[in-house]
Image (cartoon, rainbow, N blue to C red):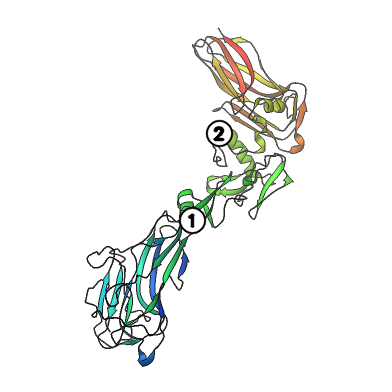
Amino acid sequence: MNAFVPKTRIAVVAAMICSVPLMADTIEPRVGSSTSITARGKDILTVDVYIDSLTSGPNNDDDIKAFRVTLPCSATVGTGGAGTIEFVDTMTDPSPVLDAMNTDYIFYNSSEDTITLDSGSCQSTMLADFPFVAAGVTTDVVDTGTDVFLGTFRFEVSDDAAGTFTIALQSGTCGTDGTFLQRKDNLCHTVTLGSLTVTVPTGRCCVSNPCDVTCTADVTEYHCEETLGGVFTASTNCTGGCPCEWGSHCDDGDQCTLDLCSSGTCDNTGSAVWGDLVGATIDAANNLFECGGNGQVQTADTLACISAFGGTHNCEPCDNGSECSSNFTEATAENAEANVAQYGKLTIKGQQRAGSPGGLHYFDVYAQGFVNSGNYSFLVESTGGRSGALDVEKLYVDQLREDYIFHDQGTILVTNLARSQITSIATREDQKVSSQRNAYLGTFGVRASDNAKGEFQLAIVDQHGFVLAAETFEVR
């Protein structure tokens, strides 16, 4: 028996007049072994057409000598559906095809040397208005049974497809078009024409980063994964939100609770640990950690703190563009009231109230009336003057001074001259201090440019630009 190449156009056996059927059986399109499947956008569906069953009648009238199978160019979309499922045929992946080497093929065991073959597709409008395959034998008929293969078609799901679609076998004129089975007596065996149901489901899309997780409802898997970059769950809306992945997805707004994620469920029952800034490693190669603590103070917490005060972060920005929150930011709260409560009153004291161009002038920073301070951070700014500038040239903290806020205590000290910033952090929670007297925080030195003249304003500000203290310095 010959193997046959699809699209070879040879005349199908002559059309015959159909008689009243003796039996009613089924031809159906399948993907795998199913006539009802789910799919996602851009899927290519390989649809095989089978005789599901063909019952023998008197005189072996189920013996088949020819057939034709026709499917639509486009699937029928159900109510409320969107997008398309279209028949596809390419040079590299032709469709439809007859695989004559398939052992389930209807004429696989035919002893004839020649089998007539015909095929057409939506792209071949000269051949047909619908994609079809057709074949037949001259004298060597086939006694069919169940699961008999007739041909393969391919369909593509559009990227915006959603809802339910139906790919149904097309009826037509017996022996001429549509779908039919022709018996050895040249009559057409009437069969039930089945269909393939394709469902492109919608559901919930969860998009997460180390800071938060967002939920979008009623989207398809393709849109969720390819456009939004999220995780798709079919037939689920956003009621109750998305399962957490990181503890930072569980922020309850209370700095005193430990926010943890366990198997997709938030747990806020634990107590926050001072200095616990970041959690699990997200991307070790890039030193990225989960925003928010994990109940342990580790090296990663120190690295996160130092990086944050240096202007970079070990955790990524949240979706709204704000920085990831953590305990060390208490010292640089986002409003004036919080700053006053944390810092108390800050003052700047210089060795002199005036200086000369080109000179280096030093100032100490003090805090008074603060409560439970475990860390602090401030930046130095200089503005004003009739000409020239005051540039911060020196930053240091004399930890041996008895009036140093954390005198005789373990601290992490960071100075960042590029940002004119000083940071000091107590390493244990029991080292938090309170004082109504002036406590020394640090020293900065400013260099007056050679052309500096006039009154300049020196200011201590937090990371959000809120002024905590100011002092006038004149260059004469």
Mark carried by residue 311: 2
Residue at (51, 52) in percent of width and height = 218
Q: How packed is label 1: few (under 14 Cα within 10 Å), some, or many (20 or more)? A: many
Q: Residues within 10 Å of mark 2 (few under 14, many from 20)?
A: few
Quadrant location of residue 17? bottom left
Horizontally, residue 129 falls left or right of residue 46, namely left
Q: Residue furthest front?
A: 20
* Distance from the alpha carbon under mark 2 to that under mark 1: 38 Å
Q: Quadrant of residue 413?
A: top right
Res. 399 in view: no
In the rendered image of this protein, does residue 234 appear above or below residue 446? below
* Amino acid tagged 2: Gly
Q: Residue at x 53, y 45 (%)?
A: 286
Name the quadrant of the C terminus. top right
- Residue 376: where, in percent of width, then height? 67, 30
Q: In the image, which is nearer the foreground, mark 2 or mark 1?
A: 1
Query: Which residue position is annotated with label 1?
Result: 221
- Depth check, front residue: 40 or 339: 40
